[in-house]
């Protein structure tokens, strides 16, 4: 099966997955996803900055209704999923959670992974980033 990433600009590498954000050269603020200007000081240049692949679950919720476009439901239709904020030390990242409900808890060590977002018309599996349990205990 052919696969592709939902947006190549979100990733520093695909195997293993690694997200890339940006860091301000003036104040050191880190953001994800990348942006052209610093939200804190507006003075520095934003440069690409690879993010850690593990962190801790900061907060979470159940996405119980389909998001607004550009969301594309999978072939079988929308199914509720968990999402949360993951603390990567320098930045909080909002992401899908690939964690069984019974295991989700604030402070859970998590690791970056990919999950299916949808299939293209040609059958290509489109992957997005998510965080799953870090069985090795986090950072």
Image (cartoon, rainbow, N blue to C red):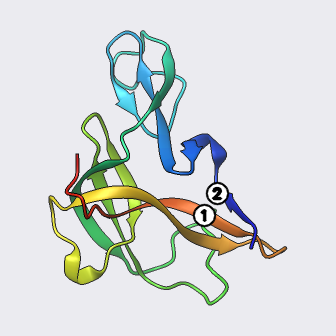
Q: Alpha carbon of mark 2 to alpha carbon of mark 1: how far?
A: 6 Å
In x, y percent, where is residue 35? 52, 30
Tell which circle, 2 or 1, labels the residue nearer the N-terminal end: 2
From what the image shows, is residue 8 above or below residue 81?
Answer: above
What kind of element bears circle 1? strand
| Residue at left offset 49%, top offset 19% | 46
Q: Are the residues flagged by discs 2 and 1 in contact, CB closer than 8 Å? A: yes
In x, y percent, where is residue 40? 33, 22
Label annotation for residue 127: 1
Q: Is residue 71 left or right of residue 137?
A: right
Which residue is label 2 attached to? Answer: 6
Label annotation for residue 76: none
Q: Nearer the viewer, residue 127 or 136?
A: 136
For the image, the number of numbered tags is 2
Q: Residue furthest right?
A: 122
Question: Which quadrant of the figure contains the C terminus?
Answer: top left
What kind of element bears circle 2? loop
In x, y percent, where is residue 49? 46, 28
| Residue at left offset 60%, top offset 67% | 71
From what the image shows, is residue 121 above or below residue 108?
Answer: below
Q: Is residue 135 left or right of residue 17?
A: left
| Residue at left offset 75%, top offset 68% | 2
Quarter assignment of residue 61: bottom left
Q: Residue furthest front?
A: 136
């Amino acid at each position: 099966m052919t696969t592709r990433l939902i947006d190549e600009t979100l990733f520093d590498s695909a195997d293993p997955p690694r997200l890339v954000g940006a860091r301000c050269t003036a104040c050191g603020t880190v953001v994800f996803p990348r942006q052209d200007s610093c939200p804190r000081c507006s003075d520095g240049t934003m440069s690409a900055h690879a993010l850690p692949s593990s962190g801790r679950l900061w907060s979470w919720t159940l996405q119980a209704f389909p998001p607004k476009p550009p969301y594309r439901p999978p072939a079988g239709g929308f199914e509720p999923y968990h999402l949360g904020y993951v603390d990567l030390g320098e930045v909080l990242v909002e992401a899908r959670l690939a964690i069984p409900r019974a295991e989700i808890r604030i402070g859970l060590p998590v690791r970056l992974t990919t999950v299916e977002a949808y299939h293209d018309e040609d059958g290509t599996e489109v992957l997005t980033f998510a965080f799953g349990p870090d069985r090795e205990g986090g950072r």
